[in-house]
Structure formats: C-alpha cells, structure tokens
Image (spheres, rainbow, N blue to C red):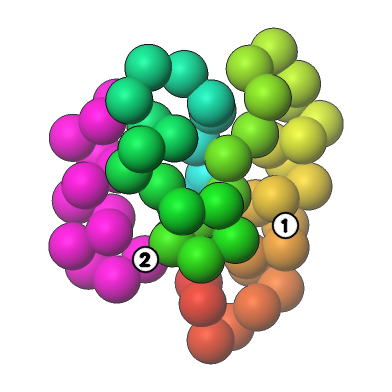
Amino acid sequence: NPISILEAMASEKPVVATRVGSVPETVLDGKTGYLVTPGRPEEIADRTIELLDDCERA
C-alpha cells in the first residue's frame, strides 16, 4: 500500500516493498528501504531480517 510506505518514511523507518507501480519512484533502494522482486517471498524475508538485525535502521 503506497500510503503505508509514505507513513513509514514520514516516521523515518525503512520499508521493504516490491518493484511495482510508483513504488520504485518513492523508495530509494538501500537508502530509504529495499525494493524486492514481486513473487519472491524469500527476498522479502531476507531484506526484512537485514533490517531487523540493523538496530540503527529498524
């Protein structure tokens, strides 16, 4: 949901989102969050774990 992405970014929290629609224009991969390939749940899990392991970003 693009609104959820904007809410997270307004709270200075990184997001994990798929590369669909206008999302790639909003999320800067590796900077404001991570962009993942649609249909790849393992990629979503990996990026989420990365963020959870990084206390400064999560």
Q: Nearer the viewer, residue 35 or 50?
A: 35
Residue marked by disc 1:
49
Q: Residue at x 65, y 78 (%)?
A: 54
Residue marked by disc 2:
13
Q: Which element is circle 1 on?
A: helix
> Which region of the structure is painted magenta?
1-14
Say what amino acid the circle numbered 1 marks: Ile
Q: Residue furthest top?
A: 39
Q: Nearer the viewer, residue 7 or 20?
A: 20
Q: Quadrant of residue 52?
A: bottom right
Say what amino acid the circle numbered 2 marks: Lys
Q: CA distance from mark 1 to mark 2?
A: 14 Å
Mark 1 or mark 2: which comes first in sequence? 2
Residue 39 in percent (x, y) is at 69, 13
Left-right relation of 2 to 38: left
- In the displayed structure, 19 sits above or below 25; it is above
Q: Residue at x 77, y 35 (%)?
A: 43
Q: Main secondary structure of the magenta part?
A: helix
- In the displayed structure, 36 sits above or below 33; it is above
Residue 3 in percent (x, y) is at 18, 35
Residue 40 in percent (x, y) is at 75, 21
Residue 57 in percent (x, y) is at 51, 77
Within the magenta stretch, is there residue 5? yes
